[in-house]
Amino acid sequence: MAADSAVFSPHPDLFPPARVAELIVLAKALYPHPDLRDGPYTRTVSSIITQAASDPGLYRTLSDGLRDLAQITTSPIRDMDSKAIDCLLRAVEQTTFFNTLRPLVAFHLYDDREVWEFIGYPGSSFEHGGYLHRGFDDLAWLPQPRIEEPTESLLPIGPLPTTSPDVTEYARTAG
């Protein structure tokens, strides 16, 4: 992670660069893409901080959560290796902080066009007529399905009942 002085905070009065750096490290640990540049993670955290600037509850959850993490670690989060950060996140995965931060990171990270390019998502298809003729079946990473007809005949199971006898009996006696 870059030195704190190189980290931009959209609201340094609320989240100084050291806290922003910690949030970036946590965002990378929550949704790791080793070959993805820092830009999307930085923009993700910037969006979350901007949201927290207008939402006192979110601000308190984030600031209290970062404070609590600092109290249970022996070194700064931004200096920890990925294994230690993973253990730290597992230790707090039931907290309000974790359950608030995780979906916010997911929303903002995967709403970033650089991430879309990185993972191969072509973007919305609605304005182009939908996916049927634009990418519906271009999933090159999936194996081709096996299409085989069974050699043996299928067992006849007869008509299925449209209502359960228990439901019919309950309806008849209720009321």
Image: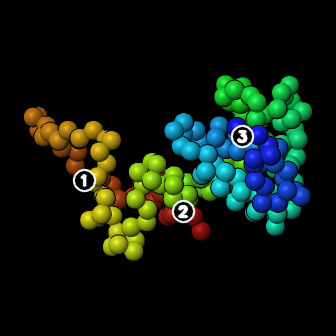
Residue type at the position of mark 3: Ala
Q: Earlier in the sequence, mark 3 or mark 2?
A: 3
Give the mark toward the camera: 2 or 1: 1
Q: How many marks?
A: 3
Determine which of the numbered discs, if any, sits on residue 173 in the image. 2
Between the residue at mark 2 and the residue at mark 1, the CA separation in whole angstroms equals 26 Å
Where does label 1 land, which residue? Answer: 159
Measuring 86% from the left and 30% from the top, which residue is drawn there?
72
Between the residue at mark 3 and the residue at mark 1, the CA separation in whole angstroms equals 67 Å
| Residue placed most toward the observer, 42 or 2 | 2
x, y percent for residue 44? 65, 54
Q: Quadrant of the C terminus?
A: bottom right
Where does label 3 land, which residue? Answer: 2
Residues packed near mark 2 inside 10 Å, few (<14), some (14 to 19) or many (20 plus): few
Secondary element at tag 1: loop
x, y percent for residue 84? 72, 25
Measuring 71% from the left and 57% from the top, which residue is drawn there?
46
